[in-house]
Amino acid sequence: MRIRKVLIANRGEIALRIVRTLREMDIRSVAVFSTADRDELHVRAADEAYPIGPPAPSESYLRIDRIVETAKKAGCDAVHPGYGFLSENAAFARAVEDKGLVFIGPPPSAIAAAGDKLNARVAMARAGVPVIPGSDRPAANAKEAEAAAAKAGFPVALKAVGGGGGKGIRVVRRREELASAFARASAEAVAAFGNGAMYVERFLEGPRHIEVQVLADAHGNAIHLGERECSVQRRHQKLLEECPSPFVDKELRARMGAAAVLAARTVGYRNAGTVEFLVDRDGSFHFLEMNTRIQVEHPITELVYGVDIVRLQVEIAEGKPLALAQGDFFPRGHAIEIRLTAEDPAAGFLPQTGRVQALRFPQGPGVRVDSHLYPGQEISLYYDPMVGKIVVHGRDRDDAIARMRRALVEMRLVGVKTCAPLLLALLSDERFRRAEIDTGFLERFVAEGTWQRLPEMNDLPAEIPAVIAAVLYAHGRQGVGRAVVPRAASSEWVLAGRREQMKWGGAGG
């Protein structure tokens, strides 16, 4: 079928990213927004936009009924979930299909099969995908978890059966710590996923987190697009990703890719997805989980492999077969992505709020910015602190590192603290440059406390932000976000035109 109109069940940078590909494909886009997001760029950029509720996600972006009803009323053919929110919710995918709409993602059955982390582990082990030793059934209480931990061997990781995004996870190194860790992890899982059941895995010391991008169509074709190195993370949340991994050679890439494709076939997968592995120092790898959606870090794969993953998602959803075979893809150069988060690393990554008083993103060769930020925007605590992504592509890893450093030095964001200074310092660390990283590297780097005293901190000069902030504050007293027009401007048509120009300026691209 030919998809002609798509509702994007998301917000922020990923919604804006999807709008852009849809426009290139001559497909109309429909945005939805909470009352807090009325002025967001994805709302301005889409062909149509509809309100779906108040700021709290539980009353807007997580309301399946409102989103599906809006898609039908707007005359959409399909729904794209983006990432986060309802993107890995089998009930949502089923509700979309029950209304005669196309879900631009995997079948509900595949989402359910991969979304239950424990069942997915068991299924992968039976299929021959390497898994970490651990539970084969959920632990309803600490006593059951203790029995599974004794079998797997300490240290262990307690993980939420319905988890994801780093929530509901605790590392337990000694038996006497297990009961309290179970109680905390289970309570967090109930709050995040409505399910407190846990499972146990042996905890691997110092592994790398490497994921493989897979694509599968409805005609039995399945391929992988190489791997992404995701080891730079804190509290199981990624902050910097690379493609390809500096650890993976051609032979390991082939083996991990084959395992990822096998994992996708095992759950009857279709569309774009990601299979995540933990990789030991000796090159052995173990299935971690499967993400049944597009990933935040998909741009680095796009730059290295020369594809548009969102376009491929839409084409697969239309029923088209994959146009290229596995042998048609090979990596070119090296790409790095940093997640720009509104957090203060010096204060334990405390989420930041405030108004974006001035903003200048980096430009130039090999630089891509995916963000929904604009001057005058209010950053709130309602949503994820990630406010954008800076992505660079170079001839090799050293070239990409140098390009990312230049990009971060060039960037200016006044009004809200971000993680950019920390990541700038990290890029100059000799251990990072030698790719001596694992999943605990960033937290050790932060704990050392030296990054705030490194010369790189001086690469973010603040000679003018204070002046800019003062001027914008004065203007803001008249209404931040409105054009400041001299009183002598006589025509209301001119005033209206300038207000419209301010409203739409920078939304496209």
Image (spheres, rainbow, N blue to C red):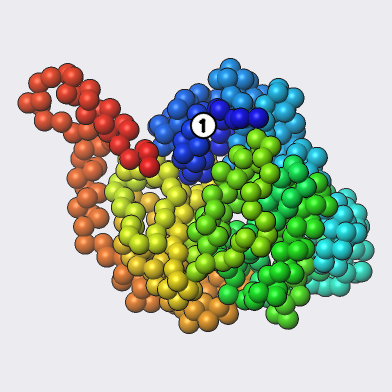
Figure check: 68 above or below 419: above
Residue 270 visible to the viewer: yes
Q: Is residue 143 left or right of residue 100?
A: right
**Residue 207 at x, y = what percent?**
69, 73
Q: Give the quarter of the image for residue 69.
A: top right
Q: What is the crowding at mark 1: few (fewer than 14 residues within 10 Å), some, or many (at least 20)?
A: some
Instruction: Determine which residue is flagged by label 1.
Output: 27
Figure check: 266 above or below 433: above
**Residue 90 at x, y = what percent?**
75, 37
Q: Give the quarter of the image for residue 410.
A: bottom left
Residue 33 visible to the viewer: no
Figure check: 275 above or below 332: above
Q: Is residue 406 left or right of residue 391?
A: left
Amino acid type shown at disc 1: Ile
**Residue 119 at x, y = what percent?**
86, 51
For image coordinates 55% across by 20% down, the residue present is: 74
For image coordinates 35% across by 62% down, the residue present is: 365
- The answer to which of 197 and 128 lies nearer the viewer is 128
Q: Is residue 383 left or right of residue 159?
A: left
For image coordinates 45% across by 59% down, the residue present is: 391
Q: Is residue 198 left or right of residue 482?
A: right
**Residue 6 at x, y = what percent?**
56, 30
For image coordinates 48% across by 82% down, the residue present is: 430
- The answer to which of 144 and 372 lies nearer the viewer is 372
